[in-house]
Image (cartoon, rainbow, N blue to C red):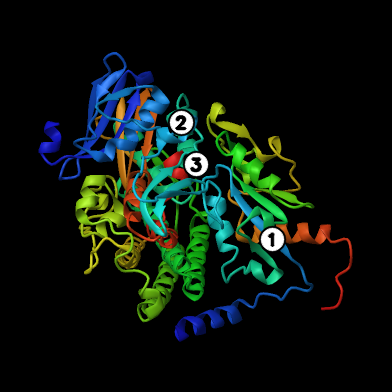
Amino acid sequence: MLTLLRDLRRLRRDLALPRPDQGRSLAIRHVDAGSCNGCEHELTLASSPYYDLQRFGLGVVASPRHADVLLVTGPVTTRMREPLLAAYAAMPEPRLLAALGDCALGCGILGAREEIVGPVEDVLPVDLRIPGCPPTPDAIANALLRLVDTRTTEPTGPR
Amino acid sequence: VRAFAHGFTLAGLYATEGGAIVRAALVSPQGEVRLVSVAARDGAVPTVVDRAYAAAWDEREAFDLYGIRFTGHEPLRPLVNHDLELARWTVPVRGDGPYQVAVGPIHAGVIESGHFRFHVVGDRILHVDVRLFYKHRGLERAAEGRSLADALAVVARACAACAVSNGVAYAHACESALGQSPTEELARGRTVLLELERVWSHLNDIAAVCAGVGLAAGNARFAALCERARRLNATLTGHRFLFGTVEVGRSALELDAKAVRAARDELQAVGAEALSAWRELQFNSSFQDRLPDIGVVDADAVSRLGAVGPAARAAGVRADVRSAALGLAYDGFEPVVPERAEGDVQARLEQRALELWQSLEILNALLDRPLRPATAEPDGGGDAIGVGRVESPRGATLCVVERTDGRLERVRLRTGSYANWPSVAHAAVDNLLPDFPLINKSFELCYACADR
């Protein structure tokens, strides 16, 4: 265990990720609306030591009730339309919706017409588009940070 | 039926020609695949589930999508069809106070969509109904009607985690239908890609089990190694998941002497760090304590349920498509199994580590010289139907292609995940509900390539 922790500490030092220059927070709820699992694998690694999304106050939460932003992957399948709408309805206002990956944006290879509702914007209003097939963990982190920063209307007070 | 008596096992079954014909793919003990076709009479064919339970999902899917009935398969529960009432797709569980816990399709984390209906007494699981296909995109139908080459992109979109495996299975199926065989160089290039996919995938799976136990340090360590493996993929091929590297009849992948040397060095470094982290896991007693005797799928269950891949080998079943792989560079391959092959979470985790070391060795040997673009060559064969079978990180993946000239008429992709989902449900029985996420992660199946 000590070796594991030592190696992680060393990795952290070697990567020398910059410290965030301001306090932020964004609670993310992820919904897979019919992805190929690529966006999920990259989103998972956005929390790995190489990117450490949490250092910016960004984290994936276990309920839409706790979420600021709904992060949706995949084209919306007919079978995921209702669960997606239910998750969005459960979120407190103000709420944001981010479409993650080319399929969610409607420019990927989607599937048979009768099984797909369409890109996320056909179902819900989209506030943030994160293109890529799949977007890299870096691209995901940067896009979400931009979303927080552009939405921050008041300057952050002293910590 | 006679084939099963001769030791053949079922590798998949599907409906074709609008539901007029059912084809079963059978694998001989030597690893040779044969197709058996049965024409439907009055929209029905006899079921094979009594002989091969592994056909259960295939038959349910064929009924839902092609309307073909399987005489003797009772009750034929829906699989892809979500429109029927609860009682039609759940197994009735009666007795002293069982109740149902419905989980999903959306889960608490970064997890694919799928629904689990647990029948429990207290925390003890009596039965679980797995309802997938929330992510069904009709990719087989979307691919059909395209040219064989164009359809690959649609088939490969089934799953990012198995993109190479599914792509190679499809390419092999097309090439066998077209009467082509990969040259040695093409075989080597594809084998490199398949093993690169296994390396990142197994690193991901070890990280996932650590997360399932709640060992954050182990999860972070193996996630970091998984990231390095994906970065290597990007360096070598331009894509972190190796998308676009597999083509029908050819390979454009080119790695010069410097690139293969750098790849070997990086793989060796990743291997050394993974081994050191793996040893740490061995000596973490609170981690190890969670693993044994949880989520057991023993050798009997493996053969009954048709489990494949690491899940089968962790129960001591030495089945691996790589042992008899045609058109790939696996000469002299021997499957590994753990010493303690109990088919539980512990054994499946150890199986990943053993296979990881083996894949790194294979890559080290294959990358001993530059890799050049290559093509498949005519072998004098060819047929309207072609079959490809590949060992994905999750197990045997079958692809059958039916064509008219260069046009794809029907494609069936049956992945290792598809084969293993019934085993997840089996493994959960008698375990505690809080252990299900760990059991599920010890299989780490894709929902995407089961649902397609």
Picture layout, residue B309 above or below residue B246: below
Image check: A117 left or right of B365?
right
Pick the residue in front: B447 or B225. Answer: B447
Q: Which mark is residue B157?
A: 3
Quadrant for residue B358, please give it: bottom left
Please say whether residue A34 is visible from this viewpoint: yes
Query: Tag 2: Cα neighbours inside 10 Å, few (<14), some, or many (≥20)?
Result: some
Residue in the image at 35% along x and 20% along y: B19
Q: Earlier in the sequence, mark 3 or mark 2?
A: 2
| Residue B236 image position (x, y, % from top left) | 49, 58
| Numbered disc 1: secondary structure | strand
Pair 1/3: label in front: 1
- Location of mark 2 (residue): B81
Quadrant for residue B35, please give it: top left
Q: Callout 3, which amino acid?
A: Arg
Assess whether mark 2 and mark 3 are in contact (beta carbons under 8 angstroms).
no
| Numbered disc 2: secondary structure | loop
Picture layout, residue B384 above or below residue B400: above
Residue in the image at 20% along x and 55% along y: B299
